């Protein structure tokens, strides 16, 4: 490509600062894309968790509404409490694995899997 315009001045693209600027913009764009993917993965995980918990809560509420005695209420509430603690613990583990994965490699686990599959 011709680095000179018709009036013998160098084109902006031929200047060393322009190449550095383009390289920096490309790097920042790549970084933004990766963090946007991380944000989407985080949001997806939290949405799925909220959906699972809401379904379990509704199921428990229906069980409580159909309970005929105090023992049934205590049993349903106790089972719900155990599931809630387990679910929140598992979710914390999933989120920490996602964060650790991104921190260590810079990409989401889904991107890592795709890279492994592509070889």
Image (tube, helix red, strand yellow):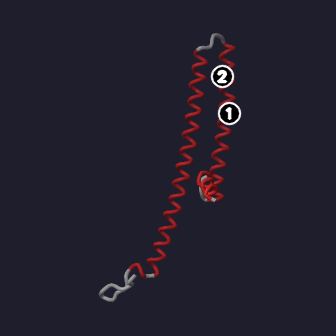
Helix, strand or loop at disc 2? helix
Q: For the residue carrying disc 1, how many other residues have a C-alpha within 10 Å: few (<14), some (14-19), or many (20+)?
A: few
Kindly identify which residue carries mark 1: 85
Kindly identify which residue carries mark 2: 77
Query: Closer to the N terminus: mark 1 or mark 2?
Result: 2
| Label drawn at residue 76 | none
- Residue 51 found in image quarter: top right
Q: Position of residue 59 (x, y in %)?
A: 59, 23
| Image quarter in which the N terminus is found | bottom left
114 w.r.t. 67: above or below: below
Residue 66 vs residue 3, the one in the foreground: 3
**Distance Cα–Cα, label 1 vs label 2:** 12 Å
Q: Position of residue 114 (x, y in %)?
A: 60, 54
Q: Position of residue 5 (x, y in %)?
A: 33, 84
- Residue 74 found in image quarter: top right
Q: Position of residue 76 (x, y in %)?
A: 66, 20
Seen at 60% across and 28% down, the residue is 56
6 w.r.t. 115: above or below: below
Seen at 63% across and 55% down, the residue is 117
The answer to whether mark 1 and mark 2 are in CB contact below 8 A is no
Helix, strand or loop at disc 1? helix
Q: For the residue carrying disc 2, how many other residues have a C-alpha within 10 Å: few (<14), some (14-19), or many (20+)?
A: some
């Amino acid at each position: 490509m011709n680095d000179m315009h018709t009036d013998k001045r160098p084109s902006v693209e031929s200047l060393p600062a322009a190449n550095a600027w383009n390289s920096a913009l490309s790097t920042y764009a790549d970084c933004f894309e990766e963090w946007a993917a991380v944000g989407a993965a985080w949001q997806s995980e939290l949405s799925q968790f909220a959906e699972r918990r809401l379904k379990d809560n509704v199921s428990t509420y229906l069980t409580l509404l159909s309970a005929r005695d105090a023992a049934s209420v205590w049993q349903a509430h106790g089972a719900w409490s155990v599931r809630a603690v387990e679910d929140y613990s598992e979710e914390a583990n999933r989120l920490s694995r996602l964060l650790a994965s991104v921190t260590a490699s810079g990409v989401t686990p889904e991107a890592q899997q795709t890279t492994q599959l592509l070889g």
